[in-house]
Image (cartoon, grey):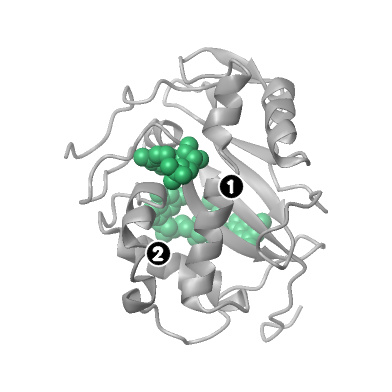
Amino acid sequence: KRKSDNSFDYFLMVQQWPASYCDTKKGCCFPVTGEPGPFFGIHGLWPNRNDGTYPSSCGNEAFDPSELAGVVDHLNTKWGTLACKSRYNEDFWEHEWSKHGTCSGLTQHQYFQASLDLYNNFDITGALRNAGIVPDDRFYSIANITSALTELLGFAPQIECNKDPEGNRQLHQVYICVAKDASTIIECPASIRNPCQGSVQFPVYGSAPSRHAV
Ligand code: 5GP
Ligand code: 5GP
Ligand code: 5GP
């Protein structure tokens, strides 16, 4: 694909379990707006192609926080940064807008609103809880996690794991496939690169070490 090809087929809506992001050698830092709640958080809404490639950084429309008037409070609680390079959520949103949002065909307001709507309409944390899958440091099968989320979404999401400093595999991110309307859940056309299998730890929320306490 040529660099100038901004086409895409669907969106990946990616959510992260904060404790798993934090419970790595790299650690995490909480945003200046405060520690996130015990919920999956938004990582991003990413245009993707069926062949596994994806467009990125499709335009030079600068991130404009004034387009977020009215949704900033929701973004702060649901799309918070955990990376230590900046504790300002706006820096994370700017990165996601520039790299992925500019390829979405949406305005900035639409892009962030669509992400929030998807988040609010599909309560991943709650669906897992309803299936008895809770962050208690125990191990859960990917099959059970997938089936609980399939009941919520109508289609199976894809699960990504990472490793804690002891080498345990833990539930890190959930990838949901969404049509180009940025709201309809669809069956995932292709696999993410390193799908997780077997059973994985669901880390206790709040137990994760972080590099800089708030
Ligand atoms: P990682 O290597 O940590 O999985 O991904 C690094 C970055 O590459 C992500 O933050 C995201 O911006 C981009 N990326 C990784 N996989 C995909 C994908 O399947 N689709 C899109 N659109 N971006 C991806
Ligand atoms: P991606 O390129 O994977 O879409 O986004 C990852 C980039 O966003 C990295 O530069 C990372 O430092 C930054 N970032 C800021 N906050 C977070 C966060 O909470 N989770 C992840 N995965 N990346 C974050
Ligand atoms: P609502 O915004 O309608 O109260 O909740 C909609 C979604 O937000 C649900 O998925 C719920 O689990 C989640 N939610 C509620 N409160 C919080 C919170 O403080 N932080 C995060 N990240 N999600 C929340």
- Asked whether residue 213 is in view, the answer is yes
**Which residue is more in the foreground, 70 or 19?**
70
- Horizontally, residue 82 falls left or right of residue 60, namely left
Q: Which residue is mark 2?
A: 93
Identity of the residue drawn at 47% across and 71% down: 97
Identity of the residue drawn at 20% across and 51% down: 32
How crowded pointer 2 is (Cα within 10 Å; few <14, some 14-19, many 20+) is rated as: many
User: Quick one: quadrant of the C terminus?
Assistant: top left
Determine the secondary structure under disc 1: helix
Amino acid type of disc 1?
Asn
Q: Nearer the viewer, mark 2 or mark 1?
A: 1
Residue 71 lies, in percent from the top left, at 38, 62
Determine the secondary structure under disc 2: helix
Distance from mark 1 CB to nearest ligand 3 atom below 8 Å: no
Amino acid type of disc 2?
Trp
Picture layout, residue 83 above or below residue 135: below
Distance from mark 2 CB to nearest ligand 2 atom below 8 Å: no
Picture layout, residue 156 above or below residue 138: below
**Which residue is more in the foreground, 167 or 34?**
34
Residue 82 lies, in percent from the top left, at 35, 46
Q: Which residue is mark 1?
A: 121
Residue 94 lies, in percent from the top left, at 39, 70
- Mark 2 to mark 1: distance in Å? 20 Å
- Asked whether residue 171 is in view, the answer is no
